[in-house]
Image (tube, rainbow, N blue to C red):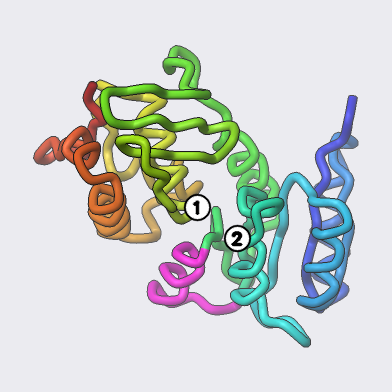
Amino acid sequence: MQKTRVLIVEDEQDIAGLIKHTLERGGDTRADVVSSGDAALKAVLDQPPDLIILDLNLPVIGGLEVCRILRARPGTSRVPIIMLTAKTSESDRVNGLDVGADDYVTKPFSLRELAARVRAVLRRGKPEAGAPDAAVYRGKFLVADFEAVAVSVEGQSVRLTRREFELLKYLVENRNRVLSRDRLLERVWGYDRLIETRSVDVHVGRLRGKLGPVGRQIETVVGLGYRFVE
């Protein structure tokens, strides 16, 4: 069985070694370690991993900038990233998630919890059992090829951020179902209630604006959440 590849970007070698040992202990994961932002970019370019654990306070290139660069490159835009940092304020978490992180873990942290979050983020991209197949969705106005990462409205290509794309994908996969804000945070952001749900509202608003007439298909269900309707 092919092992899951994780890249650990951490300049504190003791911490990096503990994370590597924890992830590899089960035998189904291979973890590589680099200690600077530029080394991380080179390692990902040479061989994109299945997931990146990214410290923010790095030499040469900081973690936030590494995340921005990876999200801007087509070949790495969808590689899951868990940020690992000593910054603990809500604004720091929101900033990290909004630049493209899938999860945000603060130091000091539990190795068992980090391993669980790695598993959760890796599961996040898999469609839920019973959800309609949405590899390619064709509606009256919207055509979305989720494998090719291509979205068009009335024949015109629409540029979405990674988060907006993942949000649309999850809504379409679960079309005609009401999805709570907490559920969207968990499945799209790979995160829990430590971040306020208003981030969901902001992203839904941006997505509606970019989708034009399709935006009206994303309904607000008062007191419950959102629903993509056909």
Q: Report the magenta stretch's main SS.
A: helix
User: Against 162, is 222 above or below?
Assistant: above
User: Is residue 29 a member of the stretch shown in magenta?
Assistant: no
Helix, strand or loop status at disc 2: helix
Name which of mark 2 and mark 1 comes first in the sequence: 2
Q: Residue 99, percent across and down? A: 50, 67
Which residue is rendered at x = 60% and y = 60% of the image? Answer: 71
Magenta stretch, residue numbers: 86-99
The answer to which quarter of the image holds residue 221 is top left
* Kind of residue at badge 2: Arg
Please tell me which residue lies in front, 217 or 14: 217
The C terminus appears in which quarter of the rendering? top left
Image point (46%, 43%), residue name: 166
Residue 55, quarter of the rendered image: bottom right
Residue that badge 2 annotates: 71
- Percent coordinates x, y for residue 169 in the rendering: 43, 35
Q: Separation of disc 2 and disc 1 at Cα?
A: 7 Å
Q: Residue furthest bottom?
A: 60
**Label 1 element class:** helix
The answer to whether marks 2 and 1 mark residues whose Cβ atoms lie closer than 8 Å is yes
149 sits to left or right of 203:
right
